[in-house]
Image (spheres, helix red, strand yellow):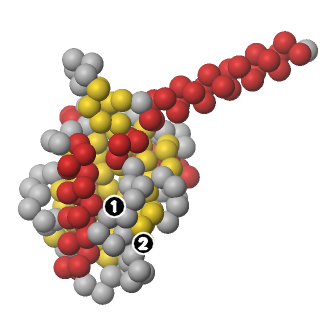
Amino acid sequence: MGGKKVCSGFAFVCLFLSVFFYACGPSTTAGNTPTVTLSDLAITTQIAGWAPLDTTAYFVDSTMINFVNGGNVSYCGACNGNSVLKAGICTKLATGQNNKAKIFVMDYGTSANAITEFNARVNSQLKSSVVPIGSFSQTVAVGSTVGGGLYTFCCMKNFYIESQLSNYDSTAVAQRDANVFLTYYQSKIKP
């Protein structure tokens, strides 16, 4: 009986470690050269007046549902109906003016998968006016205005990035802040 508990505990530890190391471990290119990790993309310090509300949360496709209120099926199946989401992070930030941001950075394994996810999300989510984000091409980053804020959609290399900016009085200010976040990620991912 004690052997079953040890075996179950060992299996749990192995599963936990494999998820942890996958989420925090290096993303690799075809030559197996480490490029950037999800840990590298976590916003842990203040950026242009924004401060983290809590610690960055890591997830895999089966646990993403905890962060998107039940919508993870649409994120995980966009690429030919197969789950290609490898892992991701969710960061929540706020300003002193009560602006809020919820940012998802998701590793889709390849740039082709990230582009497919970007196109799927843009096509399904753009219900209001489309706005540019800084100098980013609309083939890699766009925003969609919503009451009091902005949703943004972006793909950089194998990463798909989506943010929800809320509590804004001005779309222009939300666009400016979205550009700050995407420029931060661009400096880390270096497309």
Q: Do we see residue 101 in this rendering?
A: no
What residue do we see at 13% from left, 65% from top? Answer: 134
- Residue 3 spot, x, y in % from top left: 84, 12
Residue at horizontal 17 percent and vertical 42 percent from the top: 190
- The vertical placement of 148 against 185, above or below, is below
Q: Is residue 81 above or below residue 98?
A: above
In the rendered image, the residue lying farthest to the front is: 45
**Circle 2 — which element?**
strand
Instruction: Name which residue type carries label 2.
Output: Ala
Q: Residue at x 52, y 33 (%)?
A: 20
- Residue under the image location 37 percent in, 69 percent down: 50
Q: Is residue 132 visible?
A: yes
Does residue 179 appear to the left or right of 19 in the view shown?
Answer: left
The spot of residue 103 in percent (x, y) is: 38, 58
Q: Position of residue 154 (x, y in %)?
A: 23, 53
The residue that disc 1 covers is: 163
Identify the element where label 1 is drawn: strand
Q: Viewer-proximal residue, 80 or 29?
A: 29
> Is residue 185 toward the left or the right of residue 86 in the image?
left
Q: Which residue is mark 2?
A: 94
